[in-house]
Image (cartoon, rainbow, N blue to C red):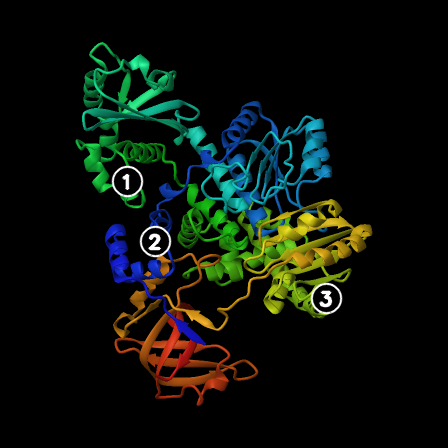
Amino acid sequence: MNWEKKEVPAELVKDLSAKYGCDLLTASILARRGLTEGETIRYFLEDDPRYLRNPFELPGMEDAVDRILAAKEEGEKILVFGDRDVDGITSTALLSSFLMDLGMDVRWQVPMGDESYGLSVKAVEEFAADYGTLIITVDCGISNIAEIARAAELGVDVIVTDHHNPQDDLPQALTIVNPKLRDSPYPFRDLAGCGVAYKLVSALRFALKSELYGQPLCILNTRPANDAFIIEIVKMRNLAEIDRLTETVVPGMVSLGETRIPGFLQGQQILAWDVPLQKKTLAKIFGNGTEFYIMDLAPEIGRDIPSTAGKSLLRIKELSRIARYSENPLTELDILINLFITFVQRRENFFGEDDPEDLQLAALGTLADLMPLRDENRIIVRGGIAALMKKARPGLSNLLFKLGLAGRHIGTQEISWQLCPAINAAGRMGSPDKAVALLLEKDPKERDRLADEIITMNENRKKLGGDVWTIVEPLAEQSLETYGSKMVLAAGENIIRGVTGIMATRLVNRFKVPAMVVSFGEETATGSLRSVKGYDLRGILEQCADLFIDWGGHDYAAGFSMYRNRWDDFQERLKAAVYTIELREDTDEETILVDAELPQAYLTPDIFRLLDQFEPYGEGNSPLTFMARGLKVTDLNLMGKTEAKHVKLTLDAGRHKWPAVYWQAAEKVKKDFDLEDTVDLVFRLSRNWFNGIETPQLIITDIRRP
């Protein structure tokens, strides 16, 4: 294996450290990972939920909120319809629990057994027959054109909240909230379905708490520019910027009526900082006869945020944490906007007691659906994990206890490898309603019973997965030649639908090409696809779209359902479609990318603070990999249940002796390293939990004698 530590300019590291207030080691890792823009860095260095993006920037959000509040006012029946996976289960529980707590008449539903993904005509018709009037989809709905059309025929409104890739034709829903809509101005497209549901709940909280909901307002500021003045005004709604006007005016040259300002301000409440100064400046520009009705933000914000009292916006800018992350210099107006948003969020207790419980569910959905851990997903997951460790919400606390995770440090690894698979097992075994019920159940005894059921389903799912793999793997291997070594396919009646996704993932890992696993029912076939990095699955599915009952998904994970009598046509179409697949050659397979070389003085348990700074780890943010030189092997043992395949070592780093594990490395002992050797190594850090005691340890990736 090659060890590659990318060289980064020392000046860049120093500049990042100084600008963003982080130590040099953190700055070097940011630079080595290509994280050098402030907009990106802030999500690695900040935890505060105020850095989350405004939910009202999502198209359709205000329409969704208005319709839900109207349903609350009228006492309407609402159906929350989700999906059977972790993202769908947590989305369903998150939105349903919030609406129930408002006292609304809510029922929820997820696909059971072999039911198809997404909203069904049957569910629509049964809900309408029960006098229901509003359906809200979560983690689904963007492809349910016929089902939503049927709802309209029956007088049922549908709000679609989803995150899957939209097709060319969109359903005629009342409104659609999806960051992936083609014309969406939302700056981050990779929210999970539960992330979108969390945004909806956040928007509803704002609407219920704040008198500013739906109110138009403008924030104004003037500043000198040589012999002229610049007048800047931003139009806001629900704390989101919707328009901006900048006028440069030389005093005495034009009247107010000759500018665009009156039309822009018409019907708006005007806010500013230090109104006496602003009015004095405006009088100088347009004359004393010009009157502006402006509310002064300075006194009220100064009382609530004392550090701003009596200070100019220029002085506040120097103190602003948000300002440091802007790549372009912020104006005084930008500072005032951020200050106003922070003030309102504090005054309204925008991130109150319920928010941490919501973040726990949003974090699980984000991790389980393999969303990129960049941008605001980092704050969602980090906040959710912190809340989970502090006080897990009912239902999750039961599962954590039964999985042996209660009372210990929890990271993305424990959630992704233990907690999420347990929840997912309910859906894979045909009973996702058990998991939703667990997350909503108020009675402790019933929660405990449901948690036991889910743990049992998880054990059964593991066994079933092992059994199905013996069927799937040889079928896939046989198909490799048929599809030009660009794809593998396994299909059959003895493949359980609930494990098609996990089987497809295993096939990708096994064959390093896109994989499809299909389960045959009596009349329909249901398939899951998983892809390799760099290839968007939609290229295949779009060529076969006319054969499907339904299809959709993400760039690298997708699914479909179709009638079995179309299977032969599909296979022929697929053989032609695979020739369009262009797979990227992986030239880095034998190269280990090193984030930092650690001197022995740094190799103490304190290094975990750095490790935790870069959490959460997962899609788009791999765990930190370190290199160290000159460590002595002071203890060495082979381990393994039936065969000694692994190596357990103790490494002397001077100030601290580190336990270490080197998986699948027994054959390297004596050959590449041995007891009493001094070695160089590449490794990752982990916390080993055994018998209630947490021990820091190294997980060795490669080792060599100097």
Q: Which residue occupies 55% across, 47% down?
A: 90
Assess whether mark 2 and mark 1 are in contact (beta carbons under 8 angstroms): no
Please, what is the three-letter code of the amino acid marked with disc 1?
Answer: Pro
Q: Which residue is mark 1?
A: 329
Q: Is residue 215 above or below residue 240?
A: above
Give the left or right position of residue 127, taking residue 260 as reference: right
- Could you tell me which quadrant the C terminus lies in? bottom left
Q: Quadrant of residue 48?
A: top left
Label 1: few (<14), some or many (≥20) within 10 Å? few
Label 3: few (<14), some or many (≥20) within 10 Å? some
Depth order, front residue of 117/682: 682
Please, what is the three-letter code of the amino acid marked with disc 2?
Answer: Thr
Q: Which residue is mark 2?
A: 36
Expressed as whole percent of the image width and height from the top left, the position of residue 124 reads 70, 35
Label 2: few (<14), some or many (≥20) within 10 Å? some
- CA gap between label 3 and label 2 equals 44 Å
Label 2 residue SS: loop
Q: Quadrant of residue 408?
A: bottom left
Please, what is the three-letter code of the amino acid marked with disc 3?
Answer: Ser
Q: Which residue is mark 3?
A: 479
| Among numbered discs 1 and 2, the one appearing first in the sequence | 2
| Among numbered discs 3 and 2, the one appearing first in the sequence | 2
Q: Quadrant of residue 212?
A: top left
Expressed as whole percent of the image width and height from the top left, the position of residue 423 reads 57, 55
Depth order, front residue of 271/481: 481
Give the left or right position of residue 470, taking residue 656 as reference: right
- Could you tell me which quadrant the N terminus lies in? bottom left
**Residue 112 in sight from this viewpoint:** no
- CA gap between label 1 and label 3 equals 57 Å
